[in-house]
Image (spheres, helix red, strand yellow):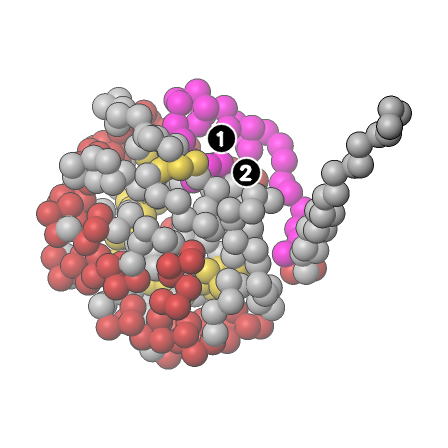
Amino acid sequence: MAGILPLPVASSPTPPARRLPPWLKRPLPTGAALNATRKLVNGLKLNTVCVEARCPNLSECWSRHVATFMILGEKCTRRCRFCAVTTARPDPPDPEEPLRLAEAAAKLGLRHVVITSVARDDLPDEGAGHFARCITAVRTRLPHATVEVLVPDFHARSECIEMVLAAGPQVFNHNVETVPSLHRRVRPQAKYARSLETLRIAKAVRPEVTTKSGIMVGLGEGRDELLAVFRDLRAVGCDLLTIGQYLKPTADAGHLPVERYYRPEEFAELAERARELGFAGVASGPFVRSSYLAEELYARPGG
């Protein structure tokens, strides 16, 4: 039987990438301002959620000298199926990071500094102390700037939440991300009720601090489920809300597919429903993310 060639291995064709609707396409800004922001961030060895989460607004924001700093490394202890951040064993916190972050904020001329982080379930305080040090560094270097933190849930530990709030941020943000029925699929290591409790504790500890949360759409949720989440957030005193379109960050099978693209008018309708429930400010649109135009939402609520 010599000369018989082995049969080729059959493989399924790779499905084509889902075509984006027209309202999710826009020209990408380029130029000196964007490159200057990149050079500054890289030169100070800082991480940004803009890069690590593959944010579609990176070019626009960096062209305006705006960046969202991501502290505590670029490796996360959780594996959320919507997020591009790497899941791995994190490195120890960098004690010099707060000062470098404050320097970057000053050089960028930021009036509203947004600080987020990976989840650090490996640390005794889950990173709360490092958040506090970063806030303090920014407030020392830029006393007239406002500070917004986008934090993990800290397992709703009041001592961690209080540690962050004691440093004096103006905005305490924690995202619920999706509706309860999808939570286990989207955020397998998080809990919807725990996220609500994190926001409730923050408002109870510091009623004067603005609390904020965000949710993605397009993962298979229903409209009534979204409205129920809005009501739940208002019930724990959440002041500001962001609603944005989920976009699959990579072709990796571990990242969830987009089930539906919401039209701009649907985002407008969801914003109106949220305002009717009493949110002080709502940002709702295809490109809205937690920190996108965060200064505008905080300074001019109702948008």
**Is residue 38 positioned above or below 152 on the image?**
above
- In the rendered image, residue 265, in percent from the top left (x then y), is placed at 58, 72
Seen from this angle, which residue lies furthest front? 1
Quadrant of the drawing holding the N terminus: top right
| Residue at 25% from the left image edge and 64% from the top image edge | 193
- In the rendered image, residue 22, in percent from the top left (x then y), is placed at 69, 59
Would residue 51 be counted in the magenta stretch? yes
> What label sits on residue 56 in the rendered view?
none
Q: Is residue 20 left or right of residue 190?
A: right
- In the rendered image, residue 243, in percent from the top left (x then y), is placed at 45, 62
Residue type marked 2: Ser
Q: Can residue 162 be spotted in the picture?
A: no
- In the rendered image, residue 152, in percent from the top left (x then y), is placed at 29, 48
For marks 1 and 2, give the CA distance. 7 Å
| Residue at 33% from the left image edge and 30% from the top image edge | 89
Quadrant of the drawing holding the C terminus: bottom left
Q: Which residue is mark 2?
A: 63
| Residue in front for this viewpoint, 237 or 86 | 86
Which of the 4 image quarters holds residue 136?
top left
Q: Which residue is mark 1?
A: 37
Image marks 1 and 2: residues in contact by CB distance under 8 Å: yes
| Residue at 21% from the left image edge and 51% from the top image edge | 155
> Which residues make up the magenta segment?
24-52
**Mark 2 secondary-structure assignment:** helix
